Amino acid sequence: MQLKDKIYKGKTIAILSGGGDTPAINSSIEKIRNRALILGFRVYGVRQGWKGLLGEGDIVDLSNQPYNGVYGGTALFSSRTNPFSTDKDAEDRVPQIIRNIKRYKIDVLITIGGDDTNGAAKRLYEQKGIPVIGFPKTIDNDLKTNTIHSYKGKEIEAVLCPGFPSAALRVSKMTRHLRSTNESHRRVMVVEVMGRDAGWLTGSALFGGSELALIPEYEMTEERKERFFEKVKHRYNEKKNLIIAVSEGVRWWDDVSKQLSMVYASSETDEYGHKRFGGVSGVIASEISNRLNIPARSQISGYYPRSGFCCEYDRQLTSALADKVLDLLIRQDYGRMPTMSEILPMEQLEEYNTTSVDMGSIGNQHLPSIYFDEKEFVFTDAYVSFLSNILGAPYLPTFGYSFKKVDPDTL
């Protein structure tokens, strides 16, 4: 029987993005929007994440206008607003959100975010019956997606989130560019990479030439710190330059307080209780200089990995996951988040390789131990295999010369 109208004509879908931005959010919005239009939905955008559903609401119509999915960040803006405020004296925000969903006649809400944003959406679905679909987003790549990486006959539970491929590409390029100045001055360079609780993104510096690494999964106790300095000294003496990649969330042993500590850029916390990290690379570089008498500098990648244009891998990834969103919408299978079933090269990122997970089980996932040798402070061949699907083979430029030193006594 022929349908006269599209199956969801007269229905409205709304998209919001919350938390830290990535280069792939606009791509995600564009791809989801386009597929929702195919089904007949009117498509709204909620600006500033959950904040856009508070008060009188901040809603825009995305239905019939161009949308640039290549440019990074989110044209819908973002915030770390928490619908379920942890402040005991704060006004209950949930009634405001429910009221605006009804006022704007929103039938389905799609939330692009990490554990915080999608976790809040799941609670609204379970407690208030709001139809929601989550969409993964984080440069840290620590959102549980149940994506399998096949490596030498083993099945490793890995993670693949939109935004991570573009950020990993930037970290690898930045590290590669630092090699020339580092070799010129025969230094140790400590490169700090975002990663509050997991070292997924820090490993991408390996593809630009870092040789040692510290990640949050392994605390730098007094004993491990001593072993680390021995490794630094040995590696540096081999060729008189060294790049070390460090996650911002590394727990570092403080010789004065005699305890593990973390370095914060600010003591303020967001509405999900997170403090802002930053500066551990400077602490480590200073100790390398003072204790080993080796010239060392720190370089914080900061927001650079979050910024810029969406890479081709991310474009294809968001397209495949948006196809899965279309499938979930058709079947009205709410409370779920699309994911890739396997870690695959770009040409295999298609809907038939996707699946979906319950939004209540997404959580955070640390870097598997098989990806990191905690005794040697290096990422393993298993991690190289994982990231090679996304970035290709590591590329390490070098001067490559072996000059013959002139002996004046022979002249």
Image: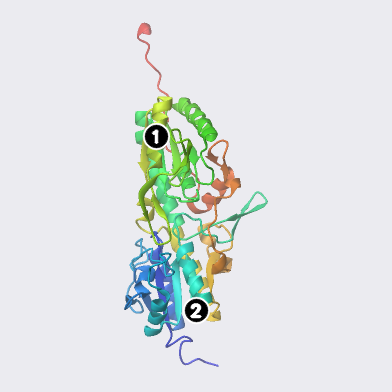
Q: Residue at x 35, y 72 (%)?
A: 52
Query: Residue type at mark 2?
Result: Lys
User: Which quadrant does the N terminus fall into?
Assistant: bottom right
Query: Residue 346, how many percent across, how many down?
Result: 50, 59
Residue 136 visible to an observer of this rendering:
yes
398 to 152, vertically: above or below: above
Q: Are marks 2 and 1 in contact (CB under 8 Å)?
A: no
Query: Residue 85, how many percent across, how many down?
Result: 42, 67
Residue 178: which disc? none
186 to 387, vertically: above or below: above
User: Which quadrant does the C terminus fall into?
Assistant: top left
Residue 209 visible to an observer of this rendering:
no
Closer to the N terminus: mark 2 or mark 1? 2
Residue 285: which disc? 1
Badge count: 2
Q: Residue at x 55, y 60 (%)?
A: 144
Q: Is residue 33 left or right of residue 143?
A: left
Q: Residue furthest top?
A: 409
Colouring? rainbow
Query: Residue type at mark 1?
Result: Ala
Name the element at disc 1.
helix
Of 120 and 163, which appears nearest the observer?
Answer: 120
Which of label 2 and label 1 is nearer to you?
A: 2
Q: Residue at x 33, y 76 (%)?
A: 55
Residue 128: which disc? 2
